[in-house]
C-alpha cells in the first residue's frame, strides 16, 4: 500500500509539473484547464503526503492507516468525478496514466483492508490475549496480597475471640457458684411466691382499682393517702407491698375492712359474681389469716435476698463481673473493627478471583479464535 501511495504521489507531481509548464506558455486555449489540473494535482499531493504508514505495525496502527487512506480516496474520487471531465479533452494521456495508477492504489487499499479485517484481526486477538495474560499475572499477584492480608486479620481476630470466651467463662463461673447462685435460687423462690400471692389476691384486683378511682374522685370513704399508695403498690408489686408490711399485714387488713364496708354498701358497683368472690377472699384473709404463712415465707426470702446483696463477697463478685464485662466490651470493639477489615479483604479477594476467572476464559477464547486451538488455563 505504501508503495502504491508513493507511486501516486510521484504521478501527482508529474501532473503538477506538466500543468505548470502549460500555464507558463499562456496558451489561452489550454490555460484554464491547466490551472484546474495544477490545483487538483496540488490537492492530491497535500492529501497523499499526510498519509504516514505506521512505524510499528499493530492492528490498531494499521486500522488507523486504513481509515485515513479511505478518507483520502473518498475525496479524491469526488475530485476526479467533478474535475477530470472539465479538463477533457486536454492532458488525456496524463489523466489516463494517473487513473491507472490511482486504480492500482485503490486495489492495494482493498487488499490491505481485507487482510486487516479478515486475517490480521486474528493477530490482534492474539495481541489482546497477551495483554490479558499480563493483566492476569497482576491480578494473581494481587490475589496473593489479599490472601495474606485476610490471613493476617484472621490471626488477629482469633486470639481476641479466645480472650472474650475466657472472660465470658469467668463471668459464667462467678454467676454459677457462691452468693450469686444462692441469689438466683432466692429470686426464683421470690418469683414463685409472688405468683402465689397474685393468685390469692386475684379477686381483689378489680375492687382495688375501683377503690382507687373512688378515693381519687372524692368519695374515698375514709381511705388515707398511705392506704391509697399501698393499694397502688399491691396492684403493681404485690410481693414488695406484702413484705414491707409488719407481721399480720395490718395495712392490708385495714384496706380490706374498708373494702368490705364498700361492698356491703355497693359503692363500687361491682357485678354480683365479682363482688361475691371478693367477699370470699376478704373473709379468708381477715378472719382465717389465709396469708399468714405466705407472709412468713415471703419475708424470709426477702431477708435472705437483702443479706446476700449486702454481703462483701457479693460486692467483690459484682466488681469482678463489671471489670470482666468492661474488658469484654473493649475486646468486642476491637473484634468488630478487625472483622470489618477482614470482610473488606474477603470481598476484594472474591472479586479478584472472579476477575481472574473471567480473564482466563477470555484468554482461552481469544487463543482459540486466533489459532483455532483450545487451551485451558488452570
Image (cartoon, rainbow, N blue to C red):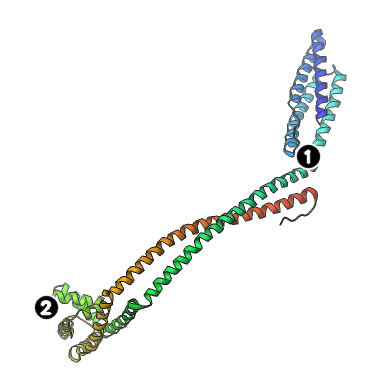
Quarter of the figure with the C terminus? bottom right
Q: Residue 349's image quarter?
A: bottom right
**Of callouts 2 and 1, which one flags the residue occurring earlier in the amino acid sequence?**
1
Q: Is residue 57 left or right of residue 249?
A: right
Q: Please determine whether, in this image, residue 271 is positioned above or below residue 232.
A: below
Which of 155/1 is in front? 155
Marker count (numbered): 2
- Estimate how packed mark 2 is, as few (under 14), some (14 to 19) or many (20 or more) residues with alpha carbons within 10 Å: few
User: What secondary structure is marked by label 1?
Assistant: helix
Q: Which residues are magenta?
A: 114-118
Question: How far across and how far down the image is residue 237, in percent?
Answer: 26, 76
Q: Main secondary structure of the magenta part?
A: helix
Q: Position of residue 149 (x, y in %)?
A: 56, 55
Name the residue nearer the viewer: 153 or 283.
153
Indicate whether residue 144 is drawn in magenta.
no
Task: List the single residue furthest toward the top.
Answer: 26
Q: Position of residue 242 (x, y in %)?
A: 22, 81
Residue 66, relative to residue 15: is it above or below? Answer: below
Is residue 21 positioned above or below 134 on the image? above
Residue where numbered disc 1 is placed: 116
Residue 222 is tagged as: 2
Secondary element type, mark 2:
loop
Badge 1: how crowded within 10 Å, few (<14), some, or many (20+)? many
The alpha-carbon separation of the residues under discs 2 and 1 comes to 112 Å
Please give left or right for residue 89 compared with residue 159 in the image. Answer: right
Amino acid at each position: 500500500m505504501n508503495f502504491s501511495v508513493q507511486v501516486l504521489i510521484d504521478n501527482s507531481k508529474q501532473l503538477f509539473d506538466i500543468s505548470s509548464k502549460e500555464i507558463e506558455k499562456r496558451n489561452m486555449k489550454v490555460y484554464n484547464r491547466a490551472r484546474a489540473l495544477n490545483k487538483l494535482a496540488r490537492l492530491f499531493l497535500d492529501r497523499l503526503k499526510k498519509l504516514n504508514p505506521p512505524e510499528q505495525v499493530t492492528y490498531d496502527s494499521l486500522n488507523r492507516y486504513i481509515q485515513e487512506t479511505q478518507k483520502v480516496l473518498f475525496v479524491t474520487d469526488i475530485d476526479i468525478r467533478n474535475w477530470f471531465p472539465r479538463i477533457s479533452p486536454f492532458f488525456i494521456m496524463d489523466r489516463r496514466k494517473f487513473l491507472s495508477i490511482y486504480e492500482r492504489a485503490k486495489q492495494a487499499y482493498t487488499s490491505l483492508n481485507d487482510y486487516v479485517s479478515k486475517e490480521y484481526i486474528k493477530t490482534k486477538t492474539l495481541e489482546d490475549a497477551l495483554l490479558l495474560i499480563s493483566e492476569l499475572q497482576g491480578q494473581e499477584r494481587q490475589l496473593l496480597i489479599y490472601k495474606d492480608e485476610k490471613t493476617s486479620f484472621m490471626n488477629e481476630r482469633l486470639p481476641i475471640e479466645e480472650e472474650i470466651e475466657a472472660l465470658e467463662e469467668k463471668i459464667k463461673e462467678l454467676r454459677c457458684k457462691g452468693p450469686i447462685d444462692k441469689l438466683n435460687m432466692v429470686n426464683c423462690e421470690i418469683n414463685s411466691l409472688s405468683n402465689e400471692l397474685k393468685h390469692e389476691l386475684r379477686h381483689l384486683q378489680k375492687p382495688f382499682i375501683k377503690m382507687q378511682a373512688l378515693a381519687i374522685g372524692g368519695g374515698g370513704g375514709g381511705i388515707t393517702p398511705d392506704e391509697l399508695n399501698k393499694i397502688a403498690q399491691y396492684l403493681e408489686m404485690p410481693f414488695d407491698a406484702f413484705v414491707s408490711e409488719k407481721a399480720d399485714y395490718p395495712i392490708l387488713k385495714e384496706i380490706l375492712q374498708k373494702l368490705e364496708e364498700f361492698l356491703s354498701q355497693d359503692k363500687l358497683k361491682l357485678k354480683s359474681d365479682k363482688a361475691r368472690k371478693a367477699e370470699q377472699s376478704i373473709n379468708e384473709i381477715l378472719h382465717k389469716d389465709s396469708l399468714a404463712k405466705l407472709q412468713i415465707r415471703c419475708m424470709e426470702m426477702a431477708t435472705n435476698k437483702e443479706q446476700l446483696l449486702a454481703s462483701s463477697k457479693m460486692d467483690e463478685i459484682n466488681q469482678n463481673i463489671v471489670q470482666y464485662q468492661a474488658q469484654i466490651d473493649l475486646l468486642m470493639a476491637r473484634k468488630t473493627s478487625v472483622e470489618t477489615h477482614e470482610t473488606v479483604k474477603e470481598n476484594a479477594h472474591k472479586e479478584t478471583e472472579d476477575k481472574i476467572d473471567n480473564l482466563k476464559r477470555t484468554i482461552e477464547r481469544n487463543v482459540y479464535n486466533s489459532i483455532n486451538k483450545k487451551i485451558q488455563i488452570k
